[in-house]
Image (cartoon, grey):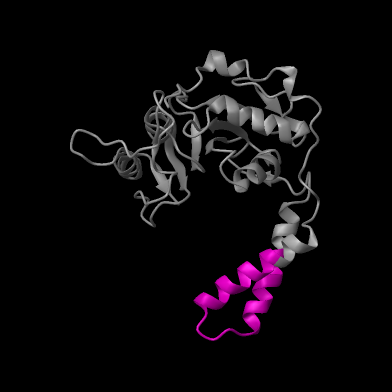
Amino acid sequence: GESAMASPGAAAQCGSSSAGTAQDTVNPQLAPSEEQEARKLLREALEHFAQEPSKLVAEDVAKYSAALQTLLVKDGPHLRISRGDVLPRLLIVSDPLEEFDDVVMLRCCVWNSVACIDVVLSGGSHTPCERLEHVRSLFDVYREARFDVPIHSPVGGTIIFRNDGYAPPADTIDAFVNCGPCSAQTLRAACGSGLRLGGLIVTVGANGDGTSLSGINQKQTSSRTRALSYETDGDGRRVWDVVIEHAKHTRAAYV
């Protein structure tokens, strides 16, 4: 059935004390069974793309396993994103409650970044309010999180959770990172007027040229339903493709 996305005012009420005393669940290292499974999956992928599996495959498995262990260390290495003497501002769209990668990203990457980060929580199958409650229930560092209220991390970063539909002010965003679907309103603002000239667009799940693929991250959320869809403009082109193409030609670098 239909379920309207929480408005910013209503979403702010998500941060009640009902989250209780949940403990931070990111472990400093993978459990043996998880590490074995990760190694197996990576080995199969590397062997699939290597015509003649060799010592290089084993070396790559060890390298990526070590990198993963480092990333999952709680309060691990700081991620410093430089823009001269000014902290850069990133807008990251995230959809926790879908897959575990966004949860890891929010705790291990966002929390340890020396930057100002707006985290727009997606609508869709779950409301932004439900997603924020999930994050609050998992991690002590986010237990008191509210929409539109800055959180200051120990490494010198600032994190602000935003409701899907958030439109950043003009010329304030240095990078847009697409880790989940969002409304057309947020997409147009984040990759349009809100993005500084020369800003960066980082997409997840798109084609190499930035155009939409079959995944969910390039779809749009709606305030009227939990369903995701490819919204189109008057010419029948996907809104995502139109916005990214325009940004690449007028304002942004694309990764």
Q: Residue furthest front?
A: 1
- Asked if 117 appears above or below 150 in the picture, the reply is below
Residue 175 position in % (x across, y down): 50, 40
Residue 27 position in % (x across, y down): 79, 49
Between residue 11 and residue 211, name the one nearer to us.
11
Left or right: 43, with 185 as reference point: right
Q: Residue at the spot x=68%, y=24% of the render?
A: 145
Q: Is residue 86 visible?
A: no
Q: Is residue 26 visible?
A: yes
* Quarter of the N terminus within the rendering: top left
Q: Residue furthest left?
A: 235
Q: Quadrant of residue 22?
A: top right
Judge whether residue 158 is colored magenta: no
Left or right: 117, with 34 as reference point: left
Q: Residue at the spot x=81%, y=27% of the render?
A: 21
- Asked if 135 appears above or below 39 in the picture, the reply is above
Q: Residue at the spot x=19%, y=33% of the render?
A: 234
Q: Quadrant of residue 223?
A: top left
Q: Residue at the spot x=30%, y=40% of the render?
A: 246
- Asked if 91 appears above or below 108 in the picture, the reply is above
Left or right: 5, with 88 as reference point: left
Q: Main secondary structure of the magenta part?
A: helix
The magenta stretch is 37-65
Residue 123 position in % (x across, y down): 48, 30
Residue 44 position in % (x across, y down): 58, 73
Judge whether residue 55 is colored magenta: yes
Between residue 233 and residue 201, name the one nearer to us.
233
Q: Quadrant of residue 31?
A: bottom right
